[in-house]
Amino acid sequence: MLLRLLVGLVFTLSLSPVVAQPTYTLSGIVRYSASGQPIGQAAVVLDYDKVTTGTYTDAQGFLATDTRSCLPIVVVRSLGYLPFRTTLNLREHITLTVKLPAVSSQFEEVVITSKGPDRNGRIYNAEPS
């Protein structure tokens, strides 16, 4: 009986993780490269070992997230700006200063029409008559 209990205990302990990985803080600020103004609500994504996590910057452009020791690919994106991408070696607390350049593209023309499909699913011709 005691032998069965010991074997069961050893088997159970061998299945549970014994070593916990330390966590580190990635913090920093995201700014517009031309003016230095902070960029609020920029998406910050950490992609590592089949796991993706992330956060957003606050209204002042600050970010902070906790993660385990790893080599994540960090991507920072915001609408109207070119994305920032780098690989970090997170073995300590890291503070980043990210400067995003603006996207310099303009639309040539946008056509909006109020016509749509009829009851049979056919699309009306949007060309002016």
Image: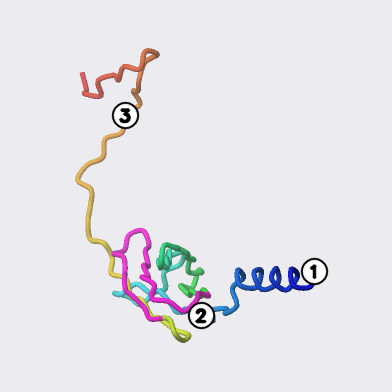
Query: Gap in Å between the C-alphas at discs 3 and 2?
Result: 50 Å
Please tell me how crowded label 2 is: few (under 14), some (14-19), or many (20+) other residues with Cα within 10 Å.
some
Mark 3 Cα-neighbour bin, 10 Å: few <14, some 14–19, many ≥20: few
- Disc 2 marks a residue whose amino acid type is Thr
Q: Determine which residue is flagged by label 1.
A: 1
Q: Residue 115: horizontal and vertical position, in percent?
A: 34, 23
**In the rendered image, which quarter is residue 129 located in?**
top left
| The magenta stretch spans residue 79 | yes
The residue identified by callout 2 is 25
Which of marks 3 and 1 precedes in the sequence? 1
* Residue at mark 3: 113
User: Which residue ends up furthest to the right in the rendered image?
Assistant: 1
Q: Which of marks 1 and 3 is in front?
A: 1
Query: Depth check: 84 or 78 in front?
Result: 84
Q: How far apart are marks 2 and 1 (CA)?
A: 48 Å
Q: What residue type is labelled 1?
A: Met
Helix, strand or loop at mark 1: loop
- Tell whether 14 sits left or right of 122: right
Asked whether the residues under the numbered discs 1 and 3 touch, taking CB atoms below 8 Å apart as contact, a structural biologist would say no
Which of the two discs, 2 and 1, labels the residue nearer the N terminus?
Answer: 1
